[in-house]
Image (spheres, coloured by chain):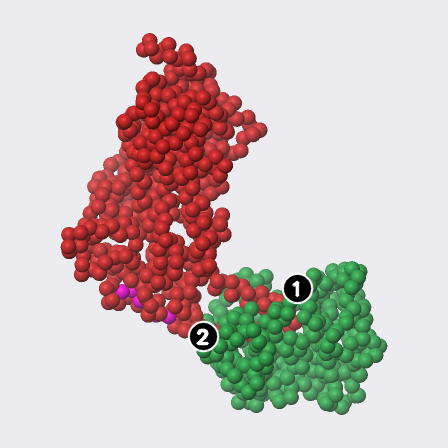
Chain colours: A red, B green
Amino acid sequence: MSTRTNYAKIRDMSTDKIRNFSIIAHIDHGKSTLADRLLEFTKTISKRNMKEQVLDTMDLERERGITIKAQAIRMQYKGYELNLIDTPGHVDFSYEVSRSLAACEGTLLLVDATQGIEAQTLANANLAIASNLKIIPIINKIDLPGAEVQMVKEELMHTMGFEEEEIILASAKEGTGAEGILDAIIERIPAPKGTDDAPLQALIFDSHYDAYRGVIVYIRIVNGTLTKDDNILFLGTGCEFEALEIGYLKLGLVPQDKLSAGEVGYLIANVKNIADAHVGDTITTIKNGSKQALPGYKPIKPMVYCGFYPINGEDYERLKEAMEKLRLNDAALFFEPETSQALGFGFRCGFLGLLHLEIVQQRLTREFDLGLIATTPNVIYKINLNNKKELYIDNPTKFPDFSYIESIEEPFLKVSIFTPATYVGSIMTLATDKRGTYKNLEYLDQQRAIITYELPLSEVIIEFNDMLKSVSSGYASMDYEPIGYREADLVKLDILINQELVDALSFIVHRDRAHYYGKKYTERLVEEIPMQMFAIPIQAAIGGKVVARETVKARRKDVLAKCYGGDVSRKRKLLEKQKEGKKKMKRVGRVDVPQEAFLAVLRINK
Amino acid sequence: MTSRQQLTMKQLTINNNVISLYIHLPFCKKKCNYCDFVSYAGKEDLIDEYVESLCKEIKTAGPQDYQTIYFGGGTPTLLSPKHFDKVLKTLTHLHKTPPPLPEGEGKKENDIEISIETNPGTADKAKLKVLRELGINRLSIGAQSFNNQHLKTLGRIHSAEDIIRFYNDARSAGFENINLDLIFALPGQTLAEWQADIQTALKLKPEHLSVYNLQIEEGTPFHLKRSTLNLPQEDLELAMYEDTIESLTSAGFKHYEISNFSKPGFECKHNLFYWRNGNYLGVGAGAHSHVDGQRWANPNSIENYIHDPRPSPQDQSSPLIFRQETIFMGLRLLDGLEIEKFKGFEQEVADSIGDNLLTKDKDNYKLTRKGLYLANLVFERFV
């Protein structure tokens, strides 16, 4: 203890005066607003400079109410250094959440007074408990008319074992509670452990690509000291760099000469590729460095794959450039070229989950103005061949002939669903319908229950979340964790449009459900594909055997029998609009197929 | 051209001296439920001033050899004969045209076609007679349907009986070139009801029939309640159209344009200018003009037209646009369009022939029967 006190004299801030914390909250429960209030209250940012919700930097995030990229901001309060480490709020990013939490000693658990605890909140709180974090429970939005403060209090006490007096009431929007929260951070969250003179171990908890500076790496010094110009090694990836600039963050970067144990900050080291600064990796010095990586590192593994194809074949290069730009800032985005007989040249892309997929897709369309076909998402299947070899397949079209297949395994999830008790029955029906295996049902109180099922990931990515919301009037929420591969009796369902197999529409389905899916899928496609000059048969087939068939009737009449007199420009505009509509479709054989049709399987029950 | 001229009505100089004149009269007693044309109810007190402006615009354009004159609406017959007299006199005083027809002599080879649109019940026999005597020689009657229930649904202010009375009055007033406008695919209409409309129309023995398929246009009362209208499905619409073609051609009519049928020699010359992508000057509120490849439109509002009659900026024009428009307007004519007009569109022509939408007929390409029913899909290929 005495060495440490002495040491503290020569550094800016003793570890005793450092508090590292994060905020756990469900989407829309007010995390960003609370962060804003803390920054304001500690005068880290003046109100005038305040851009609403500083932590959410991208428009898309703001629109969806989700913070995707974590950042860390340092505040000064009553002589303490408080580092707020932001965490992503969606289940797709649970690994990133776990690494953000690993960089803290405590967390604010923010619960909406009108909504109560949600599945992800609980899941992340459990992660926090597992990381030995001190949790400060806060009930937010107490000013709203629908606030059920007492009920949410009891929920927190019951599910997580908090004492009533531990719970702080706040309205981030009104600014009430900020002082109490800051005091609680100082009083309740422990100071970081770790020693400055140990070999360096710095945890990467986030990184982002900056067009001017290259990759900016966000780190927590767990042990040792990082000094500017140190030669450093990333233990997980094996990459070596020089620490060109280090420092901490306020609203911008504040360069420092060194970062010591317990501190949170950034590192710029001429890292060109964000995949080299992998979240969860450990940084050490090349000289006298640590051999020991910090626990919890996991290489990124996409869970969900789909194909992206430009509607207009000439846009292939633009799509490629756009994806490369997105990857600069998204280490979890995986893609490689692939070719589809139906769609031509495109990319097979891997994502952390469906939300991640949607975000990437939207950014490609919005920011890069690309007309895009996204094919039905699928998981990675493990195929055991007759010759005892194993194959991992990320695209249904790559399935080997079924006569070579001994068995197929697919990834399973443990899914926890949080729901008001009234919806338990319909949710269990849904989960069973999706090939789920019942595991557990626990009532938190009279109103709320947690249902646990084991479900195939493939069923969860196909409309499960939408249906869950639909059967629970929007109240149920879910969280999941992968639990490995399991054998299943799967078949490949092919779709033929106008007698041509459209590889991009194929998907893998359980044998027992193949007919049902075949019928629903063809029905849905008939709705999605507009009538054309000829009748278009739509067939679903398994191994060449047709299991369902529908027909898009031929367009028989499309003639403007009306008098516009001399207004020829209006006629022209109508024709142009009609033609424009077709350009947004992909021509498959002789048939114009709209974008929506390629995701029809996601909406077969609508 | 000076900016002043650009900002006001146009003085026309035409390279190719052939041009038609369209005169828009946007007044109606009541607006029909399906109508999205430039026409207004309850603005009759502006008629005098409006006609002044029309004459001014016609004068500004200068003396032209108008090949046809067309009074369209609206309901032109809401105006009194003195208004027509004034407009026609203005044209006469610009010398060249039109020579008023000698009374009672009917159609002659060198008469120019002067049409007027009317609605049943908006003119009596005496008024029709005066109009005829002023030189107007073609009458187009907005009949739309002979079924009183459907007329009511459409928001028409006349009955089937009114149409027949009006038609007979027009005949006795000396009109020997009469068109009836009819609309099919009305809300709740059956094939039998439509066939009955056609038969009633044929009994009147008009020289010309314009048969339109009801379109639900934005901004109309029909559009607002379109989901409750019980509109015929595509198959029924097609059956009605097929039946129309069959009945009218058997009755000696020539199906010469997608929506138009005439006895031999009675094609609407004025409309042929549109379909052949010719020159026309449109005067009056909301009127469109096309002169030497340039297109523009007058303001839609009557008040704006009277007080600040600046036409719209010209629509985009180019030789390519002109050729495209020549094709998609020209193919509306059942005889089709000369092959040389398709220069530069060889691929589209070949595809369309391959799809059995176009066919070669002597020196023309024309729509096949299938192409006629799918005309929009054909035209789309040429824009």
Q: Amino acid at mark 2?
A: Arg
Dot 1 falls on a residue whose secondary structure is loop
Q: Amino acid at mark 1?
A: Asp
> Depth check: A200 or B285 in front?
A200
Q: Position of residue A86 (x, y in %)?
A: 41, 31
Q: Quadrant of the N terminus of chain A?
A: top left
Tell me which residue sits at (49%, 22%) in the image: A42
Place residue A603 in its image quadrant: bottom left
Place residue A229 in its image quadrant: top left
What numbered label is drawn on residue B315? 1
In this rendering, the answer to whether A422 lies above or below A568 is: above
Magenta stretch bounds: A536-541
Residue B231 visible in the shown view: yes
Q: Position of residue A350 (x, y in %)?
A: 34, 47
Q: Position of residue B290 (x, y in %)?
A: 69, 71
Mark 2 is surrounded, within 10 Å at the Cα level, by few (under 14), some (14 to 19) or many (20 or more) other residues, namely: some
Tell me which residue sits at (40%, 29%) in the image: A242
Magenta stretch mostly in which secondary structure? Answer: strand
> Depth check: A22 or A434 in front?
A22
What numbered label is drawn on residue A556? 2
Tell me which residue sits at (81%, 72%) in the image: B62
Q: Is residue B327 left or right of residue B240?
A: right
Query: Magenta includes A540?
Result: yes
In this rendering, the answer to whether A183 lies above or below A319 is: above
Query: Magenta includes A307?
Result: no
